[in-house]
Image (cartoon, rainbow, N blue to C red):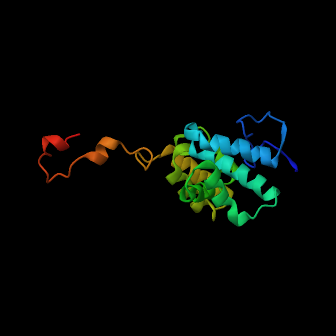
């Protein structure tokens, strides 16, 4: 099997360190990535997208059917196909945009990353970078991953009060 560096297409090694120059087979890299994705509650969405891009690169290098990539990844990681398809869209962000996003609150907002990936796909680099900076500086207060549960559980205004057994 061919060897691949653990450095991703976006410039960060699979272990998060750019100085890692070890070589692994594509199969070994996929196994390591799958393990990180399985236990990756601590990964932000940008890191998860980076791992997915690395996995896809190795998967293709093995000569596997690219049409089976999402199915295979879902089976081996337990991540749903719909989530994988959204995260895969994030991998289309230009490398310069990734650099701006790393370590920001936007990096853990899948909804915003997908929107940004879709919007920047038709932009020149200068415009894409400006749009990214604007998003970082003007982060929406709430989104799917950050909406306070209490607000979601509040009763509608026309309901005076819930019976005692239904109060939260």
- Measuring from the top left, give residue 163's x and y in whole percent: 13, 44
Whether residue 114 is visible here, answered yes or no, is yes
Determine the residue positioned at 59% across, 37% down.
103
Q: Picture coordinates of residue 166 (x, y %)?
A: 19, 44
In the rendered image, the residue lying farthest to the front is 75
Q: Is residue 91 visible?
A: no
Q: Position of residue 60 (x, y in %)?
A: 78, 58
Question: Would residue 154 be found to the left or right of residue 134 on screen?
Answer: left
Q: Residue furthest right?
A: 2
For the point 55% across and 55% down, which residue is it? 80
Residue 8 x/y as whole percent: 75, 46
What quarter of the picture does the C terminus occupy?
top left
Residue at position x 34%, y 43% from top? 149
In the image shown, does 106 or 108 lie closer to the viewer? 108
Query: Looking at the image, how many numbered discs can be counted on the residues?
Result: 0
Instruction: Work out whether residue 136 or residue 62 is closer to the camera in this orientation and state it.
Output: 62
Residue at image position (76%, 55%) is 59
Question: Image check: 15 left or right of 152?
Answer: right
């Amino acid at each position: 099997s061919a060897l691949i560096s653990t450095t991703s297409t976006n410039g960060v090694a699979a272990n998060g360190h750019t100085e890692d120059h070890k070589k692994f087979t594509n199969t070994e890299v996929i196994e390591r990535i799958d393990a990180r994705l399985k236990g990756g509650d601590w990964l932000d969405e940008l890191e998860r997208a980076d791992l997915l891009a690395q996995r896809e690169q190795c998967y293709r290098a093995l000569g596997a059917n690219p049409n089976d990539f999402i199915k295979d990844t879902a089976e081996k990681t337990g991540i749903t196909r719909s989530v994988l398809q959204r995260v895969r869209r994030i991998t289309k962000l230009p490398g310069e945009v990734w650099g701006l996003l790393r370590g920001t609150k936007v990096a853990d907002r899948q909804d915003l990353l997908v929107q940004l990936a879709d919007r920047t796909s038709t932009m020149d680099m200068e415009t894409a970078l400006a749009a990214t900076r604007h998003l970082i500086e003007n982060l929406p207060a709430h989104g799917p991953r950050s909406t306070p549960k209490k607000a979601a559980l509040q009763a509608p205004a026309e309901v005076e009060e819930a019976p005692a057994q239904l109060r939260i």
